Image (spheres, helix red, strand yellow):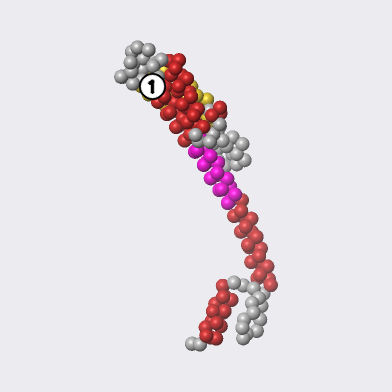
Amino acid sequence: MDIQNAKLILQDFILKLRPGPHKVLGKKDVQFDPQIRDAERGQSILEMAVILPLAAMFLSTIFAVGAYLHTAHATVQAAHDCAVAASRSLDANQGHLQGATAGQLSYSYFQLPAEAAQIGVIGNWERNGIIQCTVTSPSPVANFPMQLWVSLPDEYSYTVSLPAPPWKSEWR
């Protein structure tokens, strides 16, 4: 098999893969039926009209769920940090402030506005008492345009309860 025959075989193969007028070396111009080409064009437009909205819906859903999961993770971490910091305090007044501050700092580490989170600290700061921190944050997708397809809650709330350490000092 010489190089010229190999070229012709390759060009014939390419002609079978893609329709349309092609110039083949050593052969006459090959023309395809215009009605077939128009039908293929119409099919391509129809496929695009079906796939494009589905792809847009899929991508926007991924972005919405990703933002929601990011906020949920920040809320869980802030509630945990709030409870740990509050339980380490020796008195209730200091515990409220310490827990709320730790929760706000932890929430802001996730590049979210700390003032958006509502942080509540309650509990018994005596030895072996239970301290509870609740963090509630608004959903970042409240104005999500595709609420019909993906319904996410308007806010996310998480509560952590921890005992005050038994080795805490009785004196203040």
Residue ID at (56%, 72%): 17
Work out whether residue 29 or residue 117 is closer to the camera in this orientation and state it. 117
Residue ID at (64%, 66%): 40
Q: Position of residue 170 (x, y in %)?
A: 33, 13
Quadrant of residue 166 within the rendered picture:
top left
Can you name the residue that lies furthest to the front here? 172
- Against 89, is 145 above or below? below
Quadrant of residue 132 within the rendered picture:
top left
Work out whether residue 125 or residue 94 is closer to the camera in this orientation and state it. 94
Secondary structure state at the residue bearing disc 1: loop
> Magenta segment: does it hold 134?
no
What's the residue type where badge 1 is placed?
A: Arg
Can you name the residue that lies furthest to the left here? 167
Q: Is residue 125 left or right of residue 167?
A: right
Give the total of numbered labels.
Answer: 1
Work out whether residue 11 or residue 91 is closer to the camera in this orientation and state it. 91
Region rendered in magenta: 54-71
> Magenta segment: does it hold 63?
yes
- Against 98, is 78 above or below? below
Magenta-drawn stretch, dominant element (helix, strand or loop)? helix
Q: Position of residue 4 (x, y in %)?
A: 55, 86
User: Can you say which quadrant of the picture contains the C terminus?
Assistant: top left
Residue ID at (54%, 79%): 10
Say which residue label 1 marks.
88
Work out whether residue 49 or residue 87 is closer to the camera in this orientation and state it. 87
